[in-house]
Amino acid sequence: METPLATAVLFLYALCAVMIVGLVVLFALKIRNSSADNKARHCQEKYRDYFVYLQAHGEEEERLKVPHGEVTQSEKQIMQKKLFELMELFTGVHRQKLIWLCEDLGLIELDRKRLKGAWKWTRVDAAYNLGMMRSKEALPDLLQLLEKSSYDPSIFIIARSIARCARDTGDLREMVLLLVRYKKNFHELIVDILSDSQIDTAPLFASFLRETSTDLVKIGLIGLLAQSQSQPGIESALYKLIESEDKDIRIKAVKLVCQDVRYLTEQRVKAFMNHKDWEIRAMMAKAVGGLGLAGYIPMLKSAVGDSSWWVRHHSAYSLTALEVEGFAALCEILREERMGNKLQMAHEVIQEELEKGKRQAAATQDVEKQLQYNQKLHLYHKSYRKTISTVAALER
Amino acid sequence: MSNLVPVFYQLLTNMEASQSACGVILVACKNLSKESVEAIKRDFSPKETDSGETHFAYDKTKNLLGIMVEQHNLADTHFFALRVKDYLQESQLLSGSLLIASFPESSASSGQLFMRMMQEIKDLDGYGEIKIYDQRNSADAEEQTRILLVNHDEHVNEFLRIYLERKGYMVTVANDGMDGMEKYREWSPDLVITDLNLPILNGYQLMEKIKHHEASAMSKIVVLTDKRLEEDVQKSFALGAADYITKPFSPIELEARVRRLIS
């Protein structure tokens, strides 16, 4: 019969065995890493002059030559790392020549084989490498790999490689469709991945606006907003999206409309300033100031009394952006209002604007700026005196 | 055996007359026997240069081996020199460095090119270095534009040093802000190319210090960084940067901007 002591001794033996195995594994890993480091150092030393040659003749017409003599597989992979580091630095002909060199070294072929390997992380690593080398030939295999992948961070590595290798917008669309099937909220990340492509993505984003899938629509809107440019022919789709049931889509669509003064008819500005979503009202108020639309000063003045703090805030600041005329409207609020949020917001923004103007006028020799500050100060004093006299009269 | 100068001079004159390109390599060797020279000729001539004939000459008094390869531009000559260096090193025949050039890429006058190369190889220190001959460097070193590179990324430093030296600039490298400031004080460069992310002193602090340095009026600052935010651009220009370039960058564009600033 086994005593508790015998069990404890057995357990200790087992523990010691596990520790020894662990130490052996650690030691083996350390030796392997150290040997890899040595190999890399040796290879870098061996090809030091060759790398100088690569860097010295990066802009001439001919392709760079592969090193003379036999280059082993492991040397090629060490060279690949250095070439990738250089590729990350450059654009234009320098990067292109390094890509051609990778091709001539057989690295693309090697990674295309690794893409079909048995281990998942070998395939992902190969996908990353092929993306770095902008291999158009590998694109069908990369799309297939993405299609077969389950949802984990590796899908973004593969997707980025597809974006880098894409031949046309059709490839990019296919990649986006494969990503949105996961139904996850990573639209901004998809737009960022698409920005790695050498293809103009604006038409793709524009086409997404006409899709029924909300994910695609959101990607389209985020993409166009990131590029800060309007695409011809998107107006009708955009106006439809303003009425969308999805609040996020509504807001983004209005944001896009607010970027371009051509879309902002009087009727539309009115509609946005009276919209049920405070975000849209605030965005419109901000855009009026940013685009310098002085014609909407009365509308902004009234919006300083909005129920939402953000709308009041943006309306007041937009008025200050509309030069003396807008500032005068803010001062009118001081005269007209006796108390409440509207008066408070106008007062805060006026104070801040005058402080800023004072600093700028002191720092600059620009007569125009000094004149503008004096005008604003005069307007404020006028309205302030009236406010005081009104208060004084009321007190009396 | 001491026929390097007359033979090459004649060959280069012929090349100039026929308006053909050729590469020239001068190598500081150990004392080569006639057999060694013949072996070198044998091992190199047929397979390495398909496009043009290769000529070899050896100056016994100066221990200089000259190789001229027809129809080779500078890049081809450089690549050929890699093979020459490896071969001589393996055979333990190399005693110094290699100087390479090509006609007409390196100089419009073949005779002048060769004479200056002969002068320069004598002053070349080191062992196994491959130096690209540059007419601008040897002609007016004092008039050369001096560029200080301050970057923590050794790949950027290495590439820009090689690239800008090839374009005729004198380049010094610093790996951090403090080192950058010290080199700035010692060297008073015409232009500083700096990153914003630097150890010890960051790019802003470096620019601030340069701004208050007495020689600062002479130097232009170019920021080369991966920071893309508007605030960084604004702050850099406020601190005296003359240009702002983000990574990844086009070296051709960078050099064009440097040239514009210096001119």
Image (cartoon, coloured by chain):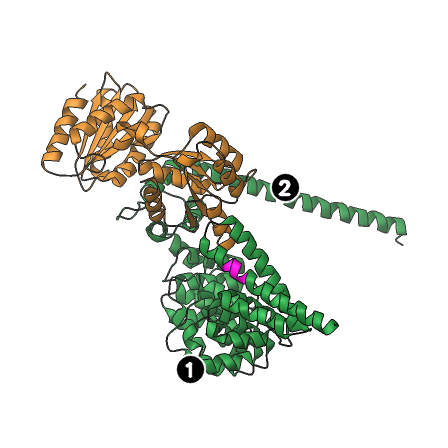
Q: Amino acid at mark 2?
A: Phe
Label 2 secondary element:
helix
Disc 1 marks which amino acid?
Answer: Ser
Of B197 and A207, which appears nearest the observer? B197
Instruction: Report which residue position mark 1 lands on.
Output: A236
Tell me whether marks 1 and 2 sit on the same chain: yes
Q: Is residue A5 above or below residue B91?
A: below
Location of residue B27 in the rendering, given as x and y in whole percent from the top left corner: 28, 26
Tell me the crowding category of disc 2: few under 14, some 14 to 19, or many 20 or more residues within 10 angstroms, Cα based.
few
Mark closest to the chain's N terminus, 1 or 2: 2
Looking at the image, residue B186 lies above or below residue A263: above
Query: On the rendered structure, is A68 left or right of A288?
Result: left
Toward the top, the furthest residue is: B61
Vertical relation: A363 (above or below) A131: above
Indicate the position of residue A40 as horizontal and vertical percent values.
Answer: 48, 40
Q: Can you give x and y, in whole percent of width and height, for residue B52 in the image?
A: 17, 39
Q: Is residue B206 left or right of residue B36?
A: right
Give the residues in magenta. A372-376
Chain (orange):
B
Distance from Cα at disc 1 to Cα at disc 2:
66 Å
SS under mark 1: helix
The image shows residue B29, relative to residue A271, as above or below, that is above
**Labelled disc at residue A27:** 2
Q: In percent of the image, x 68 and y 74: which residue is there?
A: A338
Specify whether residue A375 is painted magenta.
Answer: yes
Q: Residue placed farthest to the front in the image?
A: A396
**Place of residue A350 in the rendered image (x, y in percent of width and height, measured from the top left):** 59, 64
In the rendered structure, the colour chosen for chain A is green
The N terminus of chain A: image quadrant: bottom right
